[in-house]
Amino acid sequence: MGWLIFLLVAVAVVAAVFWAKKHFRDEIERAKRINRANRDK
C-alpha cells in the first residue's frame, strides 16, 4: 500500500511542476528582465 501512496505523490509532484512551468514561465521571464535591468543601472 505504501508504494501506491508514493506513486500518487510522485504523479502529483510531476503534474504540479508541469503546471507551474506552463503558468509561471511568463512571470519568471519578466522577473529575469526586471532583475537584469536593475543590475545594469
Image (spheres, rainbow, N blue to C red):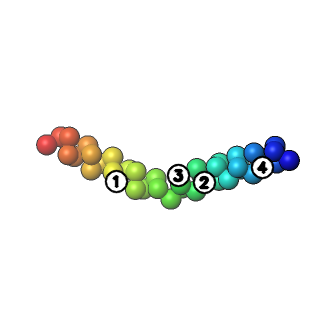
- The residue at which mark 2 appears reads as 16
Instruction: For marks 4 and 2, give the CA distance.
Output: 16 Å
Badge 4, how many Cα within 10 Å: few under 14, some, many 20+?
few
Task: From the viewer's side, name the closer residue of 7 and 25.
Answer: 7
Residue 21 bears which disc, if any?
Answer: 3
Instruction: For marks 2 and 3, give the CA distance.
Output: 8 Å
Q: Residue at x 27, y 46 (%)?
A: 35
Instruction: For marks 3 and 4, give the CA distance.
Output: 24 Å
Marks 4, 1: nearer the viewer = 4
Task: From the viewer's side, name the closer residue of 24 and 9.
Answer: 9
Horizontal side, residue 3 vs residue 10: left or right: right
Q: Residue at x 22, y 46 (%)?
A: 37
The first of marks 3 and 4 along the sequence is: 4
Q: Amino acid at mark 1?
A: Arg
Badge 2, how many Cα within 10 Å: few under 14, some, many 20+?
few
Badge 1, how many Cα within 10 Å: few under 14, some, many 20+?
few
Horizontal side, residue 37 vs residue 10: left or right: left
Q: Amino acid at mark 3?
A: Lys
- Tell me where residue 40 appears, x and y as whole percent: 18, 40
Q: Quadrant of the C terminus?
A: top left
- Tell me where residue 13 appears, x and y as whole percent: 64, 49
Disc 1, SS: helix
The first of marks 2 and 1 along the sequence is: 2
The first of marks 2 and 3 along the sequence is: 2
Badge 3, how many Cα within 10 Å: few under 14, some, many 20+?
few
Q: Amino acid at mark 2?
A: Ala
Task: From the viewer's side, name the closer residue of 15 and 6.
Answer: 6
Horizontal side, residue 39 vs residue 24: left or right: left
